[in-house]
């Protein structure tokens, strides 16, 4: 067997601060409680990407019986030069039951107390941002009472 090559690197892209609205439950589904969270505005700031979030995105979720929250967020970034970049972000959040209960109550919980990761893909027709159409990024998240903080890293 050949040895594994060096692992991919993570290059800081931006921090996303996303305002969240009230959670809407769709009731039980095949894999758990289906729900969504409307996304408000927000900011994107970093070495590779800067702009604002266009209000109207949605974070679709399944709250599974094993305590894992599956996440599928879809939203748009308006860059500082006016370009629109579509973002698809899929991942999960989980942790000890008492920590997740604190999050659900809107309490302050340290990001090291639970797991919150998503993989992001970008799509745009803006020529100056076309390189993002070929990027996969890893986001390390933190849920706050009224917003989500995502530290986004380009995967090499």
Image (cartoon, grey):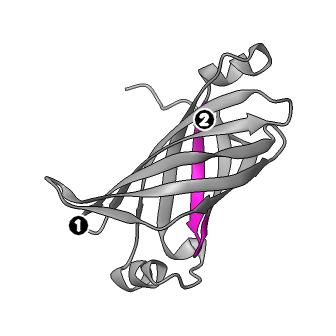
User: SS for tag 2?
Assistant: loop
The secondary structure that dominates the magenta segment is: strand
Query: Is residue 142 located in the magenta-colored stretch of the structure?
Result: yes
For the residue carrying disc 1, how many other residues have a C-alpha within 10 Å: few (<14), some (14-19), or many (20+)?
A: few
In the drawing, does residue 134 fall left or right of residue 84?
left
Instruction: Please name the residue shown 55% across and 54% down the image.
Output: 39
The disc, 1 or 2, on the residue closer to the chain's N-terminal end is: 2
Q: Which residues are magenta?
A: 136-147
Image quarter hosting the N terminus: top left
Q: Can see residue 36?
A: yes
For the residue carrying disc 2, how many other residues have a C-alpha within 10 Å: few (<14), some (14-19), or many (20+)?
A: few
Q: Residue 127, located in which quarter of the rendered image?
A: top right
In the drawing, does residue 20 fall left or right of residue 99?
right
Question: So how many labels did they put on this image?
Answer: 2
Q: Nearer the viewer, residue 78 or 45?
A: 78
Q: Can see residue 13?
A: no
Which residue does the numbered mark 2 point to in the structure image? 8
Mark 1–mark 2 distance (CA, rounded to whole Å): 30 Å
């Amino acid at each position: 067997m050949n040895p594994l090559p060096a692992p991919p690197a993570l290059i800081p892209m931006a921090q996303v601060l996303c305002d969240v609205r009230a959670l809407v439950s769709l009731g039980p589904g095949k894999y758990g409680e289906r729900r969504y969270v409307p996304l408000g505005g927000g900011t994107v700031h970093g070495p590779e990407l800067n702009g604002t979030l266009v209000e109207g995105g949605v974070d679709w979720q399944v709250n599974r019986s094993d305590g894992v929250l599956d996440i599928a967020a879809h939203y748009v970034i308006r860059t500082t030069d006016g370009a629109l970049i579509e973002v698809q972000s899929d991942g999960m959040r989980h942790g000890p039951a008492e920590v997740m209960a604190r999050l659900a109550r809107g309490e302050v919980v340290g990001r090291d107390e639970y797991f919150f990761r998503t993989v992001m893909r970008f799509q745009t027709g803006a020529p100056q941002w076309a390189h993002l159409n070929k990027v996969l990024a890893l986001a390390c998240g933190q849920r706050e009472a009224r917003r989500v903080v995502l530290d986004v890293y380009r995967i090499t």
